[in-house]
Amino acid sequence: MAIKDILTVPDARLKEVSQPVAAVTDEIRALMDDMLDSMYAAQGIGLAAVQIGVPLRVIVMDLEWGKEGAAEGHRAPRFFVNPELSDPSHETTPYEEGCLSVPQVYDVIERPSTVRLRYLDRDGVAREELAEGMFATCIQHEMDHLNGVVFIDHLSRLKRERAVAKVKKARRLAA
C-alpha cells in the first residue's frame, strides 16, 4: 500500500473518461488500497482512480472516517468497481462540495437526492443499492470524475476560473 499523488486542476488527465475494469483482481484490490491510503492521507472521504492518474472505473469512499462522534481512527471503507447510476430522483439536494483535486475550494452543487447504484464490490460481487443523502451526493461527485467532470465544471465560468487560479497560486506558493 502506498500514498499516491492526487492530481489537481487544471491537469488534463482529470478530463479523461475512465475505462471499465475487466475483472476485480489482486492488482485492482492493490490499486484500491493505494487509493484509500491516498484519500485518508489527504483527509478526503472519496476518491476516483483517475484522480491518482489511473483512468479506470474504480471509486473508494469512507463516509464514516473522520465523522464527528466516530471513534478515533474508525474506518468503514467502501469499494465501487464499474459503478453505474440510474433512476435519479426529480428532487434535488444542495450540498457544499469540495474535492481533493481542487484543494481549498468549496461551493454548493445541486444533485439528485437519490440514485440507484450498481457496481462490483472489492471481491467482484455484483451489488445494487439505493444511494441517499450524503452517500448519493458523494457517489455522484465521484462518478463525475470517472466521466471526466470535476465538481467546479458545474459552476459558472467565472467561479471555475477563480477556483483554478486559486489552486495554481497555492501550488506556486508551496513550491
Image (tube, helix red, strand yellow):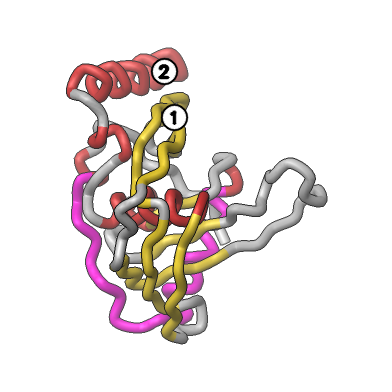
Q: Which residue is mark 2?
A: 170
The mark that comes first in sequence, 1 or 2, is: 1
Alpha carbons under labels 1 and 2: distance apart: 9 Å
Q: Amino acid at mark 1?
A: Pro
Look at the numbered disc 2 and give the secondary structure of its residue: helix
Q: 144 or 88: which is nearer to us?
A: 88
Q: Is residue 76 magenta?
A: no
Q: Which residue: 54% across, 48% down?
A: 45
Q: Which mark lies nearer to you, 1 or 2?
A: 1
Q: Main secondary structure of the magenta part?
A: helix
Q: Is there a contact, CB below 8 Å, between mark 1 and mark 2?
A: yes
Check the image and report above or below for 59 versus 164.
below
Q: 83 or 134: which is nearer to us?
A: 134
Q: Which residue: 31% across, 69% down?
A: 84
Q: Which residue: 42% across, 25% down?
A: 105
Left or right, residue 32 beside residue 20:
right
In which image quadrant can residue 80 be found? bottom left
Q: Which residue is mark 1?
A: 103
Q: Is residue 20 magenta?
A: yes
Q: 153 or 175: which is nearer to us?
A: 153
**Residue 158 percent across, percent down from the top left:** 21, 17
**Residue 98 percent across, percent down from the top left:** 44, 34
Check the image and report above or below for 3 versus 59.
above
Quadrant for the N terminus, please: bottom right
**Residue 83 percent across, percent down from the top left:** 35, 69
Residue range in magenta is 15-39
In which image quadrant can residue 54 be found? bottom left
Badge 2 local density, few (<14 within 10 Å), some, or many (20+)? few
